[in-house]
Amino acid sequence: MPPESPKPPKPHLRALLAAALALLACSAAAQAPGVGREEIVVGSIQDLSGPIATLGAPTRDGMLLRFEDANAAGGVHGRRLRLAVEDAAYDPKKAVLAARKLIQREGVFAFLANMGTPVVMASMPAIVEAGRPHLFPFSPHESTYAPLHPLKFQMFAPYQDYMEAATRHMVETKGYARTCLLYQDDDYGLEVMKGVEAALGKLGRPLHQRTSYKRGATDFSSQVARLRVAGCDFLVLATVVRETVAVMSEARKVGWKVDMLVTASGYSSQTHELGGAAVEGLYGVAVLPHPYAEGASPELAAWIERYRQRFGTAPNVWSVMGYTLAGLFVQAAEKAGPDLTTERFVAALENLESAPDIFGGPVYRFTPRDHLGNRHGRLAQIRGGRWELLTGYLR
C-alpha cells in the first residue's frame, strides 16, 4: 500500500508552529547585538561634564546630526540609527562603568568616537572582549589600531607620527635650538613625547627640558617658570583646550613670548574663543580646516546653518569630526547589506575609501591589513583670532 500522506496540522498546532518560526526569526535577527528589526544601536563614551566637555558635546552633536540625516533618508536598509551616549567626564574609572552599561543594558552594536586617551585605554579591552567594534576613538594612540585586530579601527593620525612630523618641520624651518615639552602625565602625554623625541633624534638634537602636569590641572605657574628658566625657545604642548589656554595665558602674564605648538587636542575654535589675545600665534596640528561661516562654500554654509538651527550654536572642528566619523559608520553599515552582522560590517569597513567632502578633510582608506585611515596632519596657526592652515599634510 502506498504510504499515507501526512495530515495537515491542527489549527492550534499551526499557530504554535507559526509562533516558533517567528521566534526563530527574531532570534536570528538578535544574533548581532544592537541590531533589531527597526533600529541599530551605537554606543559612545563622551566627556559631557569634565575637563574636555567642550570637545565631547560638539562631537556628540555632530554624530547625532549625521545619524538624523541617515534616518531622514530612510535609515540603513530600513533600520533607524540610535546613538546611546554615556558621560565618563574624562575619568577612566567612570569609562569602564559606562562601557559595561552600554554593552549590557543598551546592547550596542559598536562603539563610536570614545573621547580621550585615558578613557580609551581603560575601556577598550572590555569593549573588544565583548566582541564590539571599537571605532575611531578620539585618542590617536597606537594601540587603537595596532597590532592589527578585527574590531579596532582608527581614522585619526597617531600622536607619534604627526607630532614627529610637525616638530621636525618647526625645528627645521625656524631653527630652534632648545625644544622643550609640557605634557599631561598619562598615555596621551607619553605618546606625544615619543613623537617629539623621534623628531629631535632625526635632527641630532636633544629634548632640552620636559615637565608634566596632572590631568585636570588649572594652575601652570610652576611649570611655566621652570621652562622659562631653562631657556626654551620652542615649547611643544601635550595639552587639551582648557590647559592650552591656561599655559599660554600664564606665559604671556610673566612676559615670556616663546613659540608654542599644540597637538590636535588643542586645535579647536574654543582655544582662541577662550584665550583671546593670549593665544595669538599659537601653532597647532590640524587634520581639517575649521568650519568658519565666513568664507565658507555654499554647501558648507548650508551645513553650518543647519547645525546651528539644530543645536543652537555654531559648529566647530569637533562637530565636523563627529559628523564625519558617523558618516564612515553609515557607509560601512550600508555596504554590509541588510543582514548586518559584526563580520559583514568589518569586511565592509576593511574595503572602504571615503570620498572628498565639503569639509576639506582627508580621504580615509581602510584595508584588511591596515585599520588606520589616515597618518598625517597639517600645521595651522592662530592669526587674527582664527586658525589658518599653513601647510599641506606633513610627512
Image: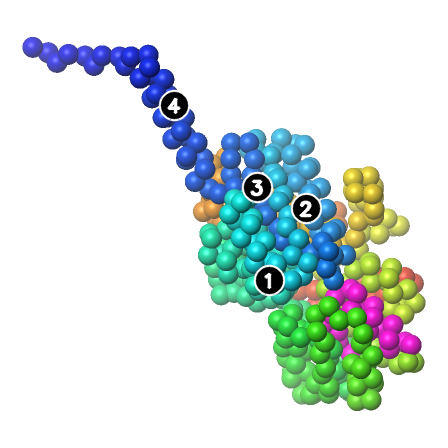
Q: CA distance from mark 3 to mark 2?
A: 13 Å
**Residue 176, percent across and down?**
79, 84
Q: Which residue is mark 3?
A: 41
Closer to viewer: mark 4 or mark 3: 4
Disc nearer the start of the sequence (1/3): 3
Label 4, secondary structure: give it.
Answer: helix
Q: Residues within 10 Å of mark 2 (few under 14, many from 20)?
A: many
Q: Which quadrant of the figure contains the N terminus?
A: top left
Q: Residues within 10 Å of mark 3 (few under 14, many from 20)?
A: many
Which of the 4 image quadrants contains residue 80? Answer: top right
Label 1, secondary structure: give it.
Answer: helix
Q: Which residue is mark 4?
A: 19
Q: Which residue is mark 1?
A: 93
Closer to viewer: mark 3 or mark 2: 3
Q: Residues within 10 Å of mark 1 (few under 14, many from 20)?
A: some
Which of the 4 image quadrants contains residue 82? Answer: top right
Label 3, secondary structure: give it.
Answer: strand
Q: Which quadrant of the figure contains the C terminus?
A: bottom right
Tell me whether the residue at label 3 lies in contact with that at label 2, contact meaning CB atoms closer than 8 angstroms: no
Which segment is the magenta one? 234-253
**Residue 274, percent across and down?**
86, 62
Residue 370 in the image: above or below residue 181: above
Give the residue drawn at x 89%, y 50%: 294
Give the residue drawn at x 92%, y 67%: 277
**What kind of residue is marked 1?**
Lys
Report the number of numbered marks: 4
Q: Which is more toward the observer, 42 or 343?
A: 42
Residue 177 is tagged as: none
Q: CA distance from mark 1 to mark 2?
A: 24 Å
Disc nearer the start of the sequence (2/4): 4
